[in-house]
Amino acid sequence: DRIAAASVVIFTDGRDRANRYTRAQALTAVNGSPSGITFFTIGVGSETEAADLAAFGRNGYVPAANVGQLANVFENVASLVTNEANSYYLFEYCSPIRSGSNNGLIIEAFFSDSNGTKFGFFETTFDATGFGGGCQL
């Protein structure tokens, strides 16, 4: 009954100076995390590797060649995180049906941007056992 979005932003200069976990262990932790958690990486300096930034930042990565680019890079990643958080919607359905399994609830969505209009739908069944009145929609 809760909608939540979580993002992790990993900031690195390309070197593991703490040596607490191996690269493989860290990558396993990222890949083993729930798909609802987004991971972005920011890499600064010449010691970063694009392949590592992409592997750990499974939802996006931004390299910065030098410290002077960091303000723009942080703004870019903040925009990615904001866009991700703003992509969740809560749908409530107030049904007059009060019992049994019901087929054919279809939720349709349209979205338009500079790339055109996109359309999607989700069809499901629901069990109305225990439904009561008092919808607040």
Image (tube, rainbow, N blue to C red):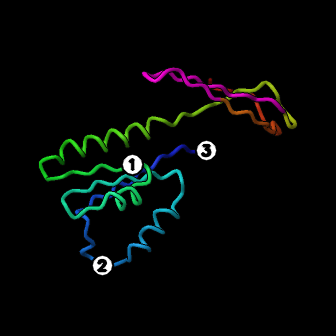
Of circles 1 and 3, which is in front?
Answer: 1
Label 1 to label 3, Cα distance in Å?
Answer: 28 Å
For image coordinates 50% across by 62% down, the residue present is 31
Of circles 2 and 3, which is in front?
Answer: 2
Mark linked to residue 1: 3
Q: Amino acid at mark 3?
A: Asp
The residue under label 1 is 60
Mark linked to residue 19: 2
Q: Amino acid at mark 1?
A: Gly
The tag earlier along the polypeptide, 1 or 3, is 3
Question: Circle 3 — which element?
Answer: loop
For image coordinates 61% across by 44% down, the residue present is 1
Question: Circle 2 — which element?
Answer: loop
The tag earlier along the polypeptide, 2 or 1, is 2
The crowding category of the residue bearing disc 2, from other C-alpha atoms within 10 Å (few below 14, some 14 to 19, many at least 20), is few
For image coordinates 75% across by 26% down, the residue present is 95
Quadrant holding the C terminus: top right
The crowding category of the residue bearing disc 1, from other C-alpha atoms within 10 Å (few below 14, some 14 to 19, many at least 20), is some
**Which residues are the magenta region?**
103-120
Q: With respect to residue 125, does 17 lie above or below?
A: below
The crowding category of the residue bearing disc 3, from other C-alpha atoms within 10 Å (few below 14, some 14 to 19, many at least 20), is few
Residue 85 rendering spot, x and y as whole percentages: 43, 40
Label 2 to label 1, Cα distance in Å?
Answer: 24 Å
Q: Are marks 2 and 1 in contact (CB under 8 Å)?
A: no
Of the pair 21 and 124, the residue shown nearer to us: 21
Q: Are marks 2 and 3 in contact (CB under 8 Å)?
A: no
In this rendering, position of residue 109 left or right of residue 55: right
Magenta span main SS: strand
Label 2 to label 3, Cα distance in Å?
Answer: 40 Å
Of circles 2 and 1, which is in front?
Answer: 1
Question: Circle 1 — which element?
Answer: strand
